[in-house]
Amino acid sequence: MKLLANIVWLVTGGWLIGLLYLLGAIVFFPLLPFLYGLIGYGFWPFGRRAISRSRLEEFSELSGKPETSLASGAKAVGFLANVLWAITFGWLLALAHIIGSLMNLALFWLVITIPNIVGHWKLIPTAFAPFRKVVVSSTLADEIESQLEKKRLGL
């Protein structure tokens, strides 16, 4: 089902969204390695979710496989990169997602465009501030969220 949704996404304009992400990554070429996941997420959004790196680090510590945590300097660089991205490409990509969702909403009678509306809205926060986020499979993201919620509740 995810494959079908991704194919419909790609055919109905996802290729254009993906190319916009690629263009932004090319302009920010020094930060390109951090944007690879975002580019793929723009082309194939279904079956994957973006989570914050801090949530992933917290889950890694909880599961007993701690990763090396980033220093506060790297967090500051991520914040500055997000600010720079937001004022250059972030707002353009978020606007493209809003317009894309409205276009898919206008074509809701085709039924196959309905998941694209959700896909566009799911990509808006990541499009606006992609740094310090990691794209993972939806099942892993659900597991991370459930484990962190159990920890928060003390279960």
Image (tube, rainbow, N blue to C red):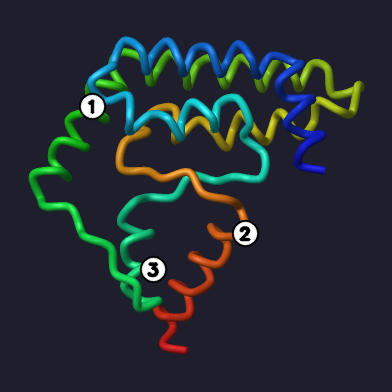
Q: Residue at x 49, y 12 (%)?
A: 20
Give yes or no for contact between labels 1 and 3 (Cβ–Cβ under 8 Å): no
Q: CA distance from mark 2 to mark 1?
A: 30 Å
Where is residue 118, by image quadrant?
top right
Say whether disc 1 or disc 3 marks the residue closer to the N-terminus. Answer: 3
Instruction: List x then y, in percent, for residue 46.
Output: 67, 39
- Which residue is tagged 2? 139
User: Dot 2 surroundings within 10 Å: few (below 14), some, or many (20 or more)?
Assistant: few
Disc marking residue 36 = none
Q: Residue at x 33, y 30 (%)?
A: 33
- Which residue is tagged 3? 59
Element carrying mark 2: helix
Q: CA distance from mark 2 to mark 3?
A: 14 Å
Q: Amino acid at mark 2?
A: Thr
Instruction: List x then y, in percent, for residue 132.
Output: 30, 43
Q: CA distance from mark 1 to mark 3?
A: 26 Å
Tell me if 109 is positioned left or right of 74 in this view: right
Q: Nearer the viewer, mark 2 or mark 1?
A: 2
Q: Quadrant of the N terminus?
A: top right
Against 114, is 67 above or below?
below
Against 36, is 51 above or below?
below
Residue that lies at the very extreme toward the left in this rendered image: 73
Where is residue 148, by image quadrant?
bottom left
Say whether disc 2 or disc 1 marks the residue closer to the N-terminus. Answer: 1
Q: Amino acid at mark 3?
A: Phe
Give yes or no for contact between labels 2 and 3 (Cβ–Cβ under 8 Å): no
Q: Nearer the viewer, mark 1 or mark 3?
A: 3
- Which residue is tagged 1? 83
Element carrying mark 3: helix
